[in-house]
Amino acid sequence: MSDGEAPQPFGRVDPDGTVYVRTATGERKVGQVPDVPPEEALAFFTRRFEALELEVSLLERRIASKALPPDDAAGSIKTVRTAVTDANAVGDLDGLLTRLQALSPVVDEARAAQRAEKARQLEEVRVKKEHAVTEAEALAAGNDWRGGVNRFRALLDDWKALPRLDRATDDALWHRFSTARTTYTRRRKSQFAQQNGQRESAREVKEQLVTEAEQLATSTDWGPTTGAYRDLMTRWKAAGAAPRGVDEQLWRRFRAAQDTFFGAKQTVNAAQDVEFRGNAEAKTALLDEAEARMLPVTDLGAARVAYRELLERWSAIGKVPRDSMRPLDARLHAIEQAVNEAEEHKWRRTNPEARARAEDTAAKLEAQIASLEEQATKASAKGDEKKAQQARDSAATYREWLAQAQKAVSDFSG
């Protein structure tokens, strides 16, 4: 070493100002600073090393804090390594290279973590797309023609916002999703086309029903027309829905025709109700008079005449309210039944065949009683009181029957 050298751990300076750096592979020239003291020349190249060391330190901190993506970090390490390897600087360049080398495993770990995270994210994307496809296929097989459109639109927006998977997987899922959407769209169009056809048919039917309803609106044939309107309503419900605006217009016309008819019917019925209530009062008074005059029936001839007069006056009065019909008819029927029973009683009393049967029955009972009394006498004479008592008991029973038979015979003589 010459007298002008300034010995340093990582470099030296020749007398002519040439500066060398020492590395594990030996020493190499890094530059020349003539006409300055060796310390100053060496310091110039040491400052360059300090700049490199600062760059390595900054890189270490950025990688440790994960501020750099792994690929960017690897690129930065490569760039700095090249700068250190070829640096015209004096310092522990081998130490810097060692520190840079130590960063590679850290970057590898970060890259592995990045791949794992990406795989996890892609799996989440795959699951989301699988769910979207499953829902799309369910929609395609269903009949939600209104909500399904909005849902397909939302699913498609979500799909576009998701990143792509590997081509094979992404294409397969997209094919299923697209097929489901196409199937749904075609079925929906077909359904609406069919509905439109049905609605048009319903429109034609309902227009005819409205025409019929309007023709009946002024009818005064209340009963049959009421039934006709009931039939029209049944046919209206069976016709289904016409196009929305048309359906509402037709319904307003249909209801207007109904209201016209039933309003007129109600007006007439209200007037009839007043008349019918008066008729009910008149028939009630007539029945009161007839019941006081005719019941109970004691003179059949007079009762017959009175009943005929009652029927004539009854018919002349006219109709009564529906809730009054049954009780009034029941009272009229009771009077009729009383007259009929009186006629039946008289017929029974004057029927010669029935009289003969009654007399014959009485005679047979008298004979049976005489026979039983004779049996009782003979049994008593023999000392058989038990048999005698049985005969007397039977005779007593027959006497009760005889009394009834004799009464029947007397009825025919009255």
Image (spheres, rainbow, N blue to C red):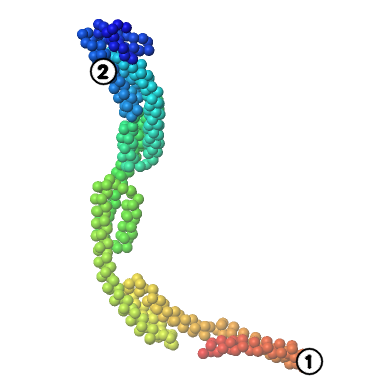
The answer to whether marks 2 and 1 mark residues whose Cβ atoms lie closer than 8 Å is no
User: At label 1, which amino acid type do we have?
Assistant: Lys
Q: Secondary structure at mark 2?
A: helix
Q: Is residue 65 above or below residue 267?
A: above
Residue at image point 27% right, 65% down: 266
Query: Which badge, 2 or 1, comes first in the chain's sequence?
Result: 2
Q: Position of residue 123 (x, y in %)?
A: 40, 31
Classify 10 Å Cα crowding around label 1: few (below 14), some (14-19), many (20 and above): few
Q: Quadrant of the N terminus?
A: top left
The answer to whether residue 197 is visible is no
Tell me the residue that label 2 is attached to.
47
Image point (39%, 84%), residue name: 291
Quarter of the image for residue 176 reads top left
Q: Which residue is at a point 74% across and 89% down the rendered structure image?
A: 386
- Crowding at dot 2, Cα within 10 Å, few <14 / some 14-19 / many 20+, comes out as some
Q: Which residue is mark 1?
A: 382
Dot 2 amino acid type:
Arg
